């Protein structure tokens, strides 16, 4: 049986200091590792980001493991680093099969192979069954039978048909968190950055749903458009397993559609309470405004949820409608009011740079965020991620867009870089973002939260970045 090493690539070239959760556990390869191990494959995980490993050290660790296959997960901004790992591997170990998966490869598998010659196979869609079939392939011709991949055969690139989605997501084994350097993640929490330094806090991601049925024009759906819900009891069984085996204290649900199936979430919360796990853990989840009710959020709080939030996206009614989000400002106001009545710490996320965005529509978004006045406010700059409607519009120059670069390392949501509007250059979008953050957080009512929540070194870096964009940077 072949040996497989799954890799989180080294740190990307451009570090976005405002992306506070810059290090997080990758649930995708944790699932794949568990799936392969269950089938007798010798599998390991090399988490270069968590272990702060550079390319030279990564190659040395790969050599020590002696894999037949390396599988690398990569978001768009990481794809160059993933390709760099493949290049380094091929220089000294030509026979190792290099496989790249994740959102970027899922969106444009053939382009990934065309752009990076040292990647042998790009996996698109769910990776568990696909990588298992890759591992089983005895020769190159066997790859023609593997659904869900693009692969290289000499100078030719072939893209096979999509793989059927896993219908029973409960059939998957629990993610193999034991293969990760978990001590490196102690004190890091999506729930509260203030947990930094607390060696008792271990937060693990958990999934209750795969797939998203909604139509946001800025989002790529790597897990498909149909929502597949896990059995609530099995989700709670997994939480208990992680508490007992890894000492997990915090959890965050990775899907942004928590609560879409109210029966599932209600049963899940009641089960947490019945097993008294609500007294042992803290957890968080992101919902949609149109599914929030006071009854649901109150039950979530009783079950141990200590933070929730929604994607607002825009405070301009027309921009919001055109985004495909399927929500209104009134629904958002109602959701925030519910959170305040329940006493639930709440987060909102917005984007500037939507198609046909204007300075006035951006100001409407900033004003709306201030009106909502929640605990945590995030403002991203629109990124034309591959596979999204926004990316297609940017390619065609529609929506008043100007595509500036395909340097994938610049595709970070907080910094922005690859996209601007014909009347609003990227330098101005960054200034607007910086000023919005400054005006929102550096108010008397918010400054204490900032000082308590963000570690001092991170705060200094963010402040310098905000000042640079808000005050010093000149519009080009």
Image (cartoon, rainbow, N blue to C red):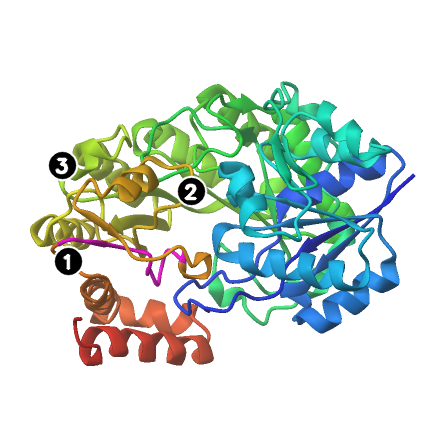
* Residue at 58% in and 61% down: 81
Q: In the rendered structure, which segment of residues is drawn in magenta? A: 411-422
Number of residues whose C-alpha sits closer than 10 Å to that of mark 3, classed few (under 14), some (14–19) or many (20 or more):
some
Horizontal and vertical percent position of residue 274: 62, 30
Q: Earlier in the sequence, mark 1 or mark 3?
A: 3
- Left or right position of 404 against 41: left
Q: CA distance from mark 2 to mark 3?
A: 26 Å
Please give the residue where the numbered disc 1 appears in the rendered image. Answer: 424
Q: CA distance from mark 1 to mark 2?
A: 22 Å
Q: Secondary structure at mark 3?
A: helix
* Residue at 22% in and 32% down: 331
* Residue at 55% in and 58% down: 80
Horizontal and vertical percent position of residue 101: 62, 43
Please give the residue where the numbered disc 3 appears in the rendered image. Answer: 317
Give the residue at the far left of this rendering: 360
Above or below, 134 relative to 228: below
Of tags 1 and 3, the one toward the viewer is 1
Which of 234/180 is in front? 180
Q: Which mark is residue 386?
A: 2
Q: Which mark is residue 69?
A: none
Question: In the picture, residue 105 is in which quadrant?
Answer: top right
């Amino acid at each position: 049986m072949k040996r497989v090493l799954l890799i989180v690539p080294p740190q990307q070239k451009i570090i976005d200091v405002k992306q506070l959760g810059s290090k997080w556990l990758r649930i995708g390869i944790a699932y794949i590792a568990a799936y392969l191990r269950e089938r007798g494959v010798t599998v390991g995980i090399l988490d270069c980001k968590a272990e702060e490993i550079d390319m030279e050290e990564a190659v040395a660790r790969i050599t020590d493991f002696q894999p037949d296959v390396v599988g690398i997960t990569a978001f768009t901004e990481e794809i160059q680093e993933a390709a760099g790992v493949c290049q380094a591997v091929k220089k000294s170990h030509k026979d190792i099969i290099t496989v790249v998966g994740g959102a970027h490869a899922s969106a444009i598998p053939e382009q990934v192979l065309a752009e990076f010659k040292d990647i042998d196979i790009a996996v698109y869609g769910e990776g568990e069954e696909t990588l298992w079939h890759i591992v089983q392939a005895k020769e190159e011709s066997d790859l023609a039978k593997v659904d869900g991949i693009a692969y290289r055969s000499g100078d030719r690139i072939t893209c096979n048909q999509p793989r059927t989605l896993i219908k029973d997501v409960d059939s998957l084994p629990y993610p193999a968190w034991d293969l990760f350097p978990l001590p490196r993640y102690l004190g890091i929490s999506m729930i509260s950055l203030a947990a930094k330094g607390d060696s008792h806090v271990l937060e693990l991601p958990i999934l209750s749903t795969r797939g998203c049925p909604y139509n946001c024009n800025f989002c790529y759906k790597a897990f498909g458009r149909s929502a597949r819900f896990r059995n609530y009891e099995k989700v709670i069984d997994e939480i208990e397993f992680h508490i007992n085996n890894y000492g997990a204290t915090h959890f965050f649900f990775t899907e942004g559609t928590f609560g879409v199936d109210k029966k599932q979430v209600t049963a899940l919360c009641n089960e947490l309470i019945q097993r008294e796990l609500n007294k042992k853990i803290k957890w968080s989840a992101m919902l949609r405004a149109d599914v929030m009710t006071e009854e649901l959020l109150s039950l979530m709080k009783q079950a141990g949820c200590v933070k929730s939030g929604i994607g607002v996206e825009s405070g301009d009614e027309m921009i919001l409608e055109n985004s495909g989000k399927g929500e209104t400002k009134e629904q958002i106001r109602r959701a925030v009011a519910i959170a305040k009545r329940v006493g639930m710490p709440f987060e909102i996320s917005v984007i500037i740079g939507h198609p046909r965005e204007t300075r006035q529509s951006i100001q409407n978004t900033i004003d709306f965020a201030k009106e909502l006045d929640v605990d945590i406010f995030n403002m991203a700059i629109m990124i034309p991620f591959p596979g999204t409607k926004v990316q297609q519009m940017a390619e065609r120059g529609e929506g008043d867009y100007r595509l500036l670069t395909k340097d994938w390392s610049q595709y970070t949501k907080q910094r922005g870089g690859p996209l601007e509007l014909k009347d609003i250059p990227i330098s101005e979008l960054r200034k607007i973002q910086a000023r919005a953050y400054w005006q929102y957080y550096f108010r008397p009512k918010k400054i204490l939260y900032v000082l308590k929540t963000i570690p001092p070194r991170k705060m200094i870096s963010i402040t310098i970045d905000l000042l640079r964009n808000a005050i010093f940077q000149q519009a080009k």
